[in-house]
Amino acid sequence: MPLDNVAFVLFKPKSPGNIGAAARALKNMGCSDLRIVPPTAFHAANDVKRTWSRQNSGQGEAATMAVHGRDVLAAATIHPGLDSALADRTLVVGTTARAGLYRSEARPIREISNELSVLSDANRIAFVFGPEDCGLTNEELKLCQRLTTIPTAPAYPSLNLAQAVIIVAYELMLATGAARELPLAQQWAPSTKTDAMLARMAKALVAIGFLPEDNPDHIMFTLRAIVGRAGLRLRELDIMNGIVSQILWFTERGHETLARKRRAGKKLK
């Protein structure tokens, strides 16, 4: 799979719910390699993975937020430190929302996603996300060969951890062509046929008194714009032609036929 060589590393996340939401985000975007470096308090445990998993998986908050991404959460690897989480990676990309001397080389994720998608064919890449409250420090960024950022409104640049994860994963998914194929756009009706219908519509609207006979174009320009924005497929054009034909028929003594049918209790077609 295109994104199999990409790992997402959550460094000292503070909220189990954010971990679960991040797992769900990765599942949405076709990613599966989730790595977690728990907060320092867990490092003293004899078995970091068992202690962390007991508190953050199963039926806990993380699992609740993961929804159908629970398999990604369950398969997440737990590491005692960032160096351990990155040991098998050949390219590490740190994420940052802050500016500064050591962060001046950070490039928007959309700008670098195509390049990274090509590199992921032959390289094992990791994206590192820092704690929710402060992000990655300069010391942690020393382990990263590249930096990326997510453009936001300057008044409030901080993103929730899972939001940051899904944006990065989304851009990579698009860049690698791993997105699901959308249905092909249906072809619109030929413009000549649409124009012919609109000409008949103008005649019909004049016949019922909606358009003035001496200047129908004024409103018809607006109707043409509406049809142009919407676009008409062949079946829709057939329906519009049917409506126009019925109006013209009604104005040309068809109303008398309908009146007789109504009086006779006959079904209208």
Image (cartoon, rainbow, N blue to C red):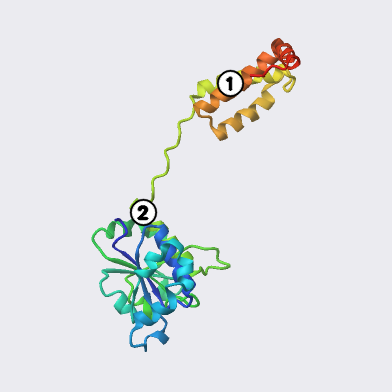
Q: Residue 87, image x and y in percent?
A: 26, 75
Q: Residue at x 29, y 78 (%)?
A: 84
- CB of mark 1 within 8 Å of CB of mark 2? no
Q: Is residue 214 above or below residue 78?
A: above
- The residue nearer to you, when weighing 104 against 58, is 58
Q: Is residue 51 visible?
A: yes
- The residue nearer to you, when weighing 248 against 61, is 61
Residue position for label 2: 175
Q: Residue 15, image x and y in percent?
A: 48, 75
Q: Residue furthest front?
A: 265
Q: Residue 11, image x and y in percent?
A: 40, 76
* Disc 2 packing (10 Å; few <14; some 14–19; many ≥20): some
Counting labels gives 2
Q: Is residue 214 visible?
A: no
Tell me, for residue 180, which label it has, or none: none
Question: Mark 1 against mark 2, which lies toward the viewer?
Answer: 1
Mark with earlier residue (1, 2): 2
Q: Residue 101, image x and y in percent?
A: 42, 75
* Disc 1 packing (10 Å; few <14; some 14–19; many ≥20): some
Residue position for label 1: 241
Left-right relation of 15 to 74: right
Left-right relation of 75 to 67: left
> The residue under label 2 is which amino acid type?
Ala
Q: Secondary structure at mark 2?
A: helix
Q: Quadrant of residue 82?
A: bottom left
| Quadrant, the N terminus | bottom left
| Quadrant, the C terminus | top right
Q: Residue at x 47, y 71 (%)?
A: 18
Q: Residue at x 40, y 57 (%)?
A: 29
Q: Is residue 7 above or below residue 215?
A: below
